[in-house]
Image (spheres, rainbow, N blue to C red):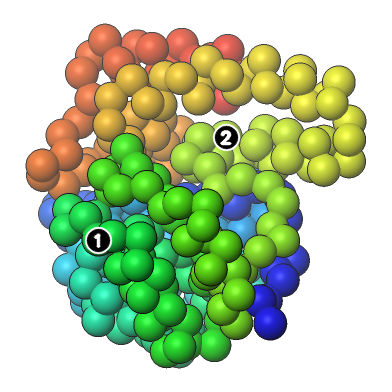
Amino acid sequence: MTVRTSFRGSFTALVTPFANGTLDEKAFRGLVDWQIAEGTDGLVPVGTTGESPTLSHEEHGRVVEWCVAQAKGRVPVIAGAGSNSTMEAIAFSQHAQECGADAVLVVTPYYNKPTQEGLYQHYKAINDAVGIPIIIYNIPARSVIDMSVDTMKRLFELRNMAHGGHGCISVTSNAAPRLCAKFQDACLKGDYGTALKLQDKLMPLHTALFLETSPAPVKYALSVLGKCADTVRLPMVRIAEKTKAAVREAMVHAGLTN
């Protein structure tokens, strides 16, 4: 029986703050508290936005631990646990479960380009190794491969492959948590007039935060708000001045800064 989740609303794909090349625990925990205070409905650490490709396994584990500990059950935590190695994905998923995460977000294996059968077996192995919901993260622009509807259908039959969520895992909500939460809430209530007004405020920011590869632009936005440094790890680099200007302009449009 596939598990039906109750995840609803605006979930933030959290950035991972750095200071002097190392994890900035204080900034990360502060970001978690601020997100919850602003109305964010759930947290997603160490996904793509959390720069998981350049975190060591130890760092990855620590970020998940901090997130669960700081959230203190106030909102669900869906821990990033993907890898192009099935064994690594299982280890990340088991660690997330042991930490108390409510679910895991597992990206389709990147670079090695598995077949649809390989994708099925990858997720089945993770399903068989844990007892918390698994959310499939299918993002061809990052992973090169695209999971077919037929493979999704097969995975739907597995016990822990989650369905039933309503909302969004958002990059923008790092910098605009309250607006994103209000937007999702309005949509869930069917209040599309309010949702449209909020979308008009947010749309320039959605666009600006992807003028360069994420999460560099949203980390810059957070630095403007004083939440963390705009430091990213190589091969990611800080955004260009032209992009900074566009992000600031979009933040002003959204009412986030003057």
**Looking at the image, can residue 61 be seen?**
no
Looking at the image, tell me whether mark 1 or mark 2 is earlier in sequence order.
1
Q: Check if mark 1's residue and mark 2's residue have beta carbons within 8 Å.
A: no
Q: Label 2 neighbourhood size at 10 Å, few (<14), some (14-19), many (20+)?
A: many
Left/right placement of residue 233 relative to residue 24 reads: left
Element on which disc 2 rests: loop
Label 1: how many Cα within 10 Å (few below 14, some 14–19, many 20+): some
- Residue 152 got which mark? none
Q: Secondary structure at mark 1?
A: loop
Above or below, 156 relative to 251? below
* Residue 252 sits above or below residue 232 on the image: above
Q: Is residue 80 left or right of residue 102?
A: left
* Camera-side residue of 253 and 110: 110
Q: Residue at x 78, y 26 (%)?
A: 195
Residue nearer the viewer, 100 or 104: 104
Q: From mark 1 to mark 2, how far is it between C-alphas?
A: 36 Å
Q: Which residue is mark 2?
A: 176
Please report the residue visible at 51 percent of the width from the left and 35 percent of the height from the top: 172
Q: Position of residue 110 (x, y in %)?
A: 24, 55
In the image, what residue type sits under mark 2? Ala
**Count of numbered circles on the image:** 2
Identify the residue under disc 1. 114
Q: Is residue 202 above or below residue 229?
A: above
Q: Position of residue 208 (x, y in %)?
A: 42, 19
Residue 239: percent from left, percent from top: 23, 25
Q: Residue at x 16, y 39 (%)?
A: 236
Instruction: Say which quadrant the N terminus sits in.
Output: bottom right
**Quarter location, residue 43:** bottom right
> Which residue type carries mark 1?
Pro
Residue 144 visible in the snapshot:
yes
Q: At 57% across and 62% down in the image, what residue appears?
A: 153
* Residue 234 pos. (x, y %): 10, 44
